[in-house]
Amino acid sequence: MTDTPSLPEGYEISTDSSRVDAERVHRWLSTDAYWALGRPREKQDRAIEGSLNFGVYDTASGEQVAYARAVTDRATFAWLCDVYVDPSVRGKGVGTALVTAVREEVRSYGVRRVLLATHDAHGVYEKIGFAPLARPDHWMVLLFEQ
């Protein structure tokens, strides 16, 4: 694991759910995130409500530029999901700093395991310590038709 990356100057991370721009997050995810294309707004709002939310905000304008959430019992397990960085700030280290903040927050609860699924961002997550499942044969999934 490399050193903890810092957020670029001019941005701040908050876990205050009242700051989340739910409309923007829904637009990002439902139109531009392969895992959530077409997700209904009501479903996204419920997901936000039931999660530990992280937003990255431009300190000058207050505009939200990135989002992530963790589904967690705040004791033993967390699932990192819906990580999204606005295209206008990609490549600045915002996403890596955001995921690091999630990692550190759930670590502070004593969580032992954080899972995530990604199709194309393995390198981003590997930089902060994520690795492929050591024993994928121990894991199972139950999928429901949507």
Image: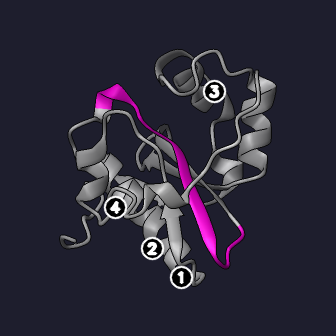
| Residue under pointer 2 | 104
Q: How many marks?
A: 4
Element type where label 1 sits in the image:
helix
Mark 1 near mark 2, Cβ–Cβ under 8 Å? yes
What's the distance in space between the residues labelled 3 and 1, CA to CA? 28 Å
Residue beneath label 3, please? Answer: 26
| In this rendering, the label closer to the viewer, 3 or 1 | 1
Q: CA distance from mark 4 to mark 1?
A: 17 Å
Which of pointers 4 and 1 indicates the residue nearer the eye? 4
Residue 9 seen by the camera: no
The residue carrying mark 1 is 108
Using a 10 Å C-alpha cutoff, classify the residue at mark 3 as few (fewer than 14 neighbours), some (14 to 19) or many (20 or more).
many
* Residue beneath disc 4: 130
Camera-side mark, 2 or 4: 4
First in sequence, mark 3 or 4: give its number.
3
Horizontal and vertical percent for residue 126? Answer: 26, 57
Of 102 and 121, which appears nearest the observer? 121
Q: In the image, residue 43 lies at what x, y percent?
A: 78, 30
Residue 128: image location, x then y, percent: 29, 63
Q: CA distance from mark 3 to mark 4?
A: 26 Å
